[in-house]
Image: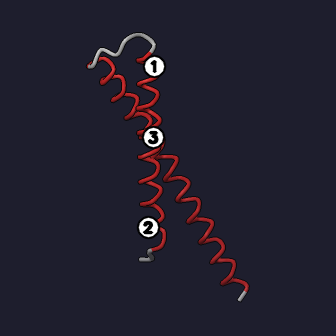
Amino acid sequence: KKKKKKTRKMAKDSCLARITAGVAIGGAVGGAVGAVYGTFEAIRYKVPGLMKVRYIGQTTVGSAAIFGLFLGAGSLIHCGKSY
């Protein structure tokens, strides 16, 4: 019985680790894509002066949050399934 509890605890820990890794990877990829896209949009729409930095930052953080959220949710859904 103790071994079953230990494997369940390990499974929960590995599930949490997978979700955390998913959020981290999603945030990194989203941040990179957001920075490139934000820079492109700032140049395209001719955002003036220091507003470019703010615009690029907002796009980067927003994109990182969305990518991280969805990759974390996907990891959570996938973690519950056993094949």
- Say if mark 2 contacts mark 1, CB within 8 Å: no
Q: Which mark is residue 64?
A: 3
Q: Nearer the viewer, mark 1 or mark 3?
A: 1
Q: How is the image coloured?
A: secondary structure
Viewer-nearest residue: 7 or 43: 43
Image quadrant occupied by the C terminus: bottom left
Tell me the crowding category of disc 2: few under 14, some 14 to 19, or many 20 or more residues within 10 angstroms, Cα based: few
> Residue 55 placed where, x, y %?
41, 24
Residue at far left of view: 44
Quarter holding residue 52 = top left
Kind of residue indicated by mark 3: Ala
Q: Which of marks 2 and 1 is in front?
A: 1
The residue identified by callout 1 is 53
Residue depicted at x 46% and y 61%: 75
Kind of residue indicated by mark 2: Ile
Mark 2 or mark 1: name the one nearer the start of the chain. 1
Instruction: Give the spatial CA distance, label 2 vs label 3.
Output: 20 Å
The residue identified by callout 2 is 77
Residue depicted at x 41% and y 39%: 63
